[in-house]
Image: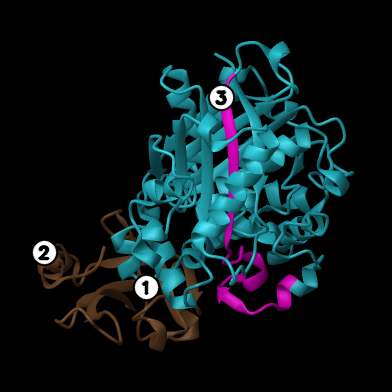
Amino acid sequence: MKIGVFGVGTTKFGELWNLSMEDIAKQAIDSALQDAAMKMKDIDALYVGNMLSGILFNQANLASLISGIYDVSIPAFRLEGACASGGLALHNAILGIRAGQYKKVLVLGVEKMTDHSQEEVTGGLMGAGSEDERLAGLTFPGIYALMAQAYLQDYHVSEESLAGVSVKNHYHGSFNPNAQFQKPITVADVMKSTKVADPLKLLDCSPVSDGAAAVVIGEVTNEKKLSRVPIYITASEVAVDAVNLCARESLTSLKAVVLAAKKAYTKTGLTPQDIHVAEIHDCFSIAEAIATEDLGFSKRGKGAIDICNEKFTLKKGKTITNSSGGLKSCGHPVGATGIKQIVEIVEQLQGKANARQVDGAKIGLTHNVGGSGAVAVIHVLQKYL
Amino acid sequence: MKNTPVTIWRRQKAQTALLGQGGTIVHWTMIRVTTSGFGKQTPYPVVYVALDTGTKMVGQLVDWENIDLQQGRKVIVVLRRLRTEDTDSVISYYTKFKPA
């Protein structure tokens, strides 16, 4: 069965204090429906990716709440897998279509974070960790800081090299009008930014953001009947690993990512070198360095160095990573991220990415991670089958 | 998971078994921005320790000096008050590490 993306949409990402969670959900959905030239009544089911509404707003039952905005009585589901909630929502939506239950499905990723204090959000995000980690006084930057210490030590990489990840992503984000930060930064800016959890500094960390993104997907039975050629989702793979860092085999590789990527490459018959454009889950600079290796774009221990050498930079590299600006520069409304990555890749493959367009992009990949590596969701998107 | 007197009571047995165990610091970080209840302790180090039994464990390091923040430093498990501001209705204690 061929699964196609018919329409995409996002809100601006950032501190959207004048908008509620329902407001941004509606903006993203309306935008995706408009792009698909559809109405909500054409949709058979709604899948929502969201992490924090229960913790921060005491709002469970989110999927029904959002379908209620449109006064439709379609099946609606909320999927939760920490920062991979969006990716999981899309994966499950695809399963609903493959099972033959639904024809056209709307998938929304949404998160509203800036209504709450830094302590509340930091605490809420630790919901993605284990009880042992919470009681050890760890934060998410703290967990990734331990992984960064391991990476810097094992591969003799400098903090400056790690900073190169944020420099690249801010450069890309400077071309994205929906990005939270649209200002390029330098390695020196990263190095002098305030420390959050050593060795990670403020500019190694993705921000707290509000935002929503939506896609309309469905089975493609007769391509000729469609008004435009859809982008196909040719792989949707999930793998999981221990939530607790202490129970993992390695601190410098995420097993879940390696497993999910392997399945995605096998199913599509592609190799890492075939990917033209990839959205990578750079919640922290170290996360992108490791992901670049886990996805097979760089050799072990070379991810950060390759990024610094502009191997993945727009107009310079062969595989471009995080053309949207990534989580670092575009923003990281956690439940929305996995869907925003899909929106970016679709726009790239349609040639609609304007100043950040990757020339000739036909094959794209998204890498969405929940927790410090407990969940990994990989999607492959292609322009032609 | 929110702590309740029951969850605190339930984890006491496992906690007691860890007390006095030795281990070695493998990695460390200094937490400067934190979650509710730990705010008054910042900045504080959290260490990733290989216990002598082979088990890996994370925990706060207490009674430390700068020289203790390095790979290979020997530590032992001690019991300390968990948070500065406790709202769990009983004062919770938890395992932390101190330099051996």
Chain assignment, label 3: A
Amino acid at the residue labelled 1: Gly
* Residue behind mark 3: A218
Q: Residues within 10 Å of mark 3 (few under 14, many from 20)?
A: many
Please determine whether, in this image, residue A235 is positioned above or below residue B61: above
Question: Whole-percent x and y of residue B79?
Answer: 21, 78
Q: Nearer the viewer, mark 1 or mark 3?
A: 3
Q: For marks 2 and 3, give the CA distance.
A: 48 Å
Q: Which numbered circle lies on residue B26?
A: none
Q: Which chain is cyan?
A: A
Amino acid at the residue labelled 3: Gly
Q: Is residue A281 visible?
A: no
Q: Residues within 10 Å of mark 2 (few under 14, many from 20)?
A: few
* Residue behind mark 2: B10
Q: Residue at x 62, y 69 (%)?
A: A15
Give SS at disc 1. loop
Q: For marks 2 and 1, give the CA distance.
A: 20 Å
Q: Nearer the viewer, residue A78 or B93?
A: A78
Q: Nearer the viewer, mark 2 or mark 3?
A: 3
Chain assignment, label 1: A
Specify the colour of chain B: brown
Give SS at disc 3. strand
Q: From the image, which quarter does the C terminus of chain A lie in?
A: top right
Question: Whole-percent x and y of residue B63?
Answer: 35, 86
* Residue behind mark 1: A137
Please determine whether, in this image, residue A202 is positioned above or below residue B48: below
Q: Nearer the viewer, residue A153 or A1?
A: A1
Highlighted range, magenta: A190-219
Question: Viewed as shown, does residue A253 lie left or right of B77?
Answer: right
